[in-house]
Image (spheres, rainbow, N blue to C red):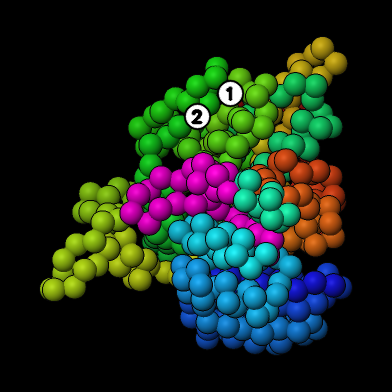
Amino acid sequence: MSRVLIIGAGGVATVVAHKVAAHPEVFSDVMLASRTQSKCDNIIKSLESRGLKKAQWQSARIDADNVPELTALLEKFKPELVINVALPYQDLHIMDACLAAGVNYMDTANYEPLDEAKYQYSWQWAYHDRFKDAGLTAILGCGFDPGVTSVFTAYAAKHHFDEIQYLDIVDCNAGNHGKAFATNFNPEINIREITQRGKYWENGDWHETDPLSVHKPLNYPRVGAKESYLMYHEELESLVKNYPTLKRARFWMTFGQEYLTHLRVIQNIGMDRIDPIDYEGHKIVPIQFLKAVLPNPGDLGANYTGWTSIGCRIRGIKDGKEKTYYIFNNCSHEVAYKETGTQGVSYTTGVPATVGAMMHLKGLWKQPGVFNVEQFDPDPFLKELGPNGLPWEEIVNGDLEL
Ligand code: NDP
């Protein structure tokens, strides 16, 4: 029985709230706090209408970038854990407030400065000693990717290999939301991520590629062949550090031609700019204005059909022989919508965040310091993941295509 504070009220927070509400035996008192309190209240109403509001729920307005204000809220509510599902820009401020108030921390995306599209763990890893000395746990990157993909890798290393050597994380969204262009999570974060240069690890070094320049069709279970693009993704940074036997680690994501054409236009006309420009005497950031006119990812669910299919394709050595292993989850957008009112990408992020929180509150993922999820025991997490909506499957010694 524990108190938790969920920060954010977007698509991912909506799923976390629904999943947390389904476990009143673990989460007894919950506060949902975000920049716009009415969004928190709407989520709580949705729980009520689904008959899910069995624990104590309350909402609050908070600017999570205001450390003293957030510290005061934490000191008043006294949660055991903060589940940060606001935006990556808030990570360090929320960690600062957690340290000040003596609260454990968890997020789903690593810190990114507002004025630079550069995401890396160094800023958050630098908090390790402060969390350790305070006897507090910080769990980084507990969504799907990062999150489940990192746990899948840890599970493979623990149970299937003596040495893991080649890792390809493959992320396919074969869903159709019926819009000409929309992003599946926060558009600003999504576009900043995708338009970056590609980067992968090979033979002890990082190698860069032009954005989305390396691609090939890959076959996804129950989906078929989809063009998959090599890009940099944050979990590669921690996985190559935590699994030094990796000779190569890459990340692939599928995109449709329509999406890529829109993205190219957005870039060509400067709408992806993250620096403020002057517009009729006002300062506006083009990508933030674009977010305001694009469909809200949290509202895409109603007409979304099809699957996401995300997993890890791993090659390595077991008992002196080469072995391949593919571990993945397929998630249906329709099923996610029926259960939570959001689409599959929010769902595949919110479920692991909830399961990660359960791991911490049950004392299974509890260790003073700052940790990536692959540093904890993967077994109890994967045991809970399926029953909470994301069943996973395995293919041993199949063709990895990579
Ligand atoms: P949304 O944009 O839908 O929601 C973000 C929420 O954070 C909004 O409710 C927003 O408030 C709130 N927020 C923003 N700034 C502040 C602030 N300063 N103080 C308080 N609240 C604030 O994003 P998503 O739900 O799609 O994504 C949430 C997180 O999940 C992101 O960090 C994203 O990167 C991560 N993610 C991780 C994935 C993974 O697999 N690991 C996959 C997908 C997403 P308001 O409503 O007022 O705008």
* Residue 119: % across, % down: 46, 46
* The image quarter in which residue 220 lies: top right
Question: Which residue was labeled with disc 1?
Answer: 248
Secondary structure at badge 1 equals: strand
Q: Seen in the image, is 256 located left or right of residue 43?
A: left
Magenta-drawn stretch, dominant element (helix, strand or loop): loop
Residue at image position (75%, 74%) is 3
Quarter of the figure with the C terminus: top right
Q: Is residue 2 above or below residue 230?
A: below
Q: Which residues are magenta?
A: 103-127
The answer to whether residue 223 is left or right of residue 261 is right
* 289 vs 77, nearest the viewer: 77
Q: Amino acid at mark 1?
A: Arg
Residue 152, by quadrant, is: top right
Q: Is residue 355 left or right of residue 296?
A: right
Label 1 vs 2, first from the N-terminus: 2
Label 2 near label 1: C-beta < 8 Å? Answer: yes
Residue 204 visible in the picture:
yes
Residue type at mark 2 is Tyr
Residue receiving disc 2: 200
